[in-house]
Amino acid sequence: MPFAALACRCVALVAALGLAAPAGALESIRAQEIRECRSGEIATWGDGRDRSAYAAALSFTYNPVGAPPWFPEALVAGQVAKAAHAWSRCGVPVRTIPWPGKPELRPGLVVVQWNETESGGNFGLANFSRGTLSLGPKAFQLLRTRNPAHDASETLQMVISHEMGHLFGLMAHSRRCVDVLSYYNNSRGEKCLARGDIASSGVVEYRHSLPTACDIERCRRANRKSPLTGGR
């Protein structure tokens, strides 16, 4: 199936951009984009077709084996729980459970793991057929090497939230720059969409680290939940 494995195209802007302009009003615009989804704003790159979530109810568990030493188990498990809580606004029942020590076959269980092979060399990759969310140790090592001053836990939270969104059924990547499901440009030179100029916003990583209002609205539509009432 074309959506059996979905690679995260999250190449952190930290290593690519040296943005220093004051955030000011444009940061306020970004905050508005995060919390509201205006009519007509939902747009994707057309690289997939949204569908219902991996299961009618989802359970996420974190396997810490193979984690880079700078990502303690409690930190990553907390980020998994934070992302799951944020996505719960979509209306799909979700919970996090402690790692049982070995994979358990149960409906809707997703194992969050560190696995270079299953991450495909990416920061992260969600696999629908296996029920896994695989994080890439080498990608995070490269980020740490190239930009040791950057708080890699911020990138980790974004990757977890992004890949979790695929498991909630968001197969296409968002073209809205601020969405956690977005990527910034495609191979044809087209760029993502924003209300303001992200290059002068002063925000190094414009994507939010958790699902935005438009991410949640797409998820609700994909899973045929009641539409959100917020936004304009």
Image: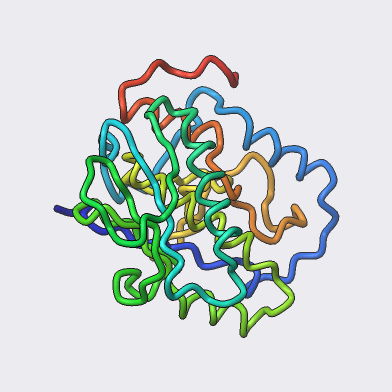
In front of the other: 105 or 113: 105
Quarter of the rendering containing residue 17: bottom right
In front of the other: 136 or 17: 136
Percent from the top left, x then y, of residue 120? 32, 72
Q: Residue at x 81, y 51 (%)?
A: 23
Q: Residue at x 50, y 31 (%)?
A: 41
Q: Residue at x 30, y 76 (%)?
A: 117
Count of numbered badges drawn on the protein: 0
In front of the other: 26 or 137: 137
- Asked whether residue 188 is in view, the answer is no
Could you tell whether 58 is left or right of 230 in the image? left
Quarter of the rendering containing residue 115: bottom left
Furthest-front residue in view?
101
**Residue 193 against residue 36 in the figure, above or below:** below
**Residue 65 against residue 92 in the figure, above or below:** below
Percent from the top left, x then y, of residue 118? 30, 70
Percent from the top left, x then y, of residue 166? 35, 47
In front of the other: 59 or 193: 59
In which quadrant will I find the C terminus? top right
- Asked whether residue 38 is in view, the answer is yes
Which colour assignment does the render follow?
A: rainbow
Could you tell whether 73 is left or right of 31 in the image? left
Percent from the top left, x then y, of residue 47? 30, 51
Furthest-left residue in view?
1
Q: Residue at x 14, y 53 (%)?
A: 1
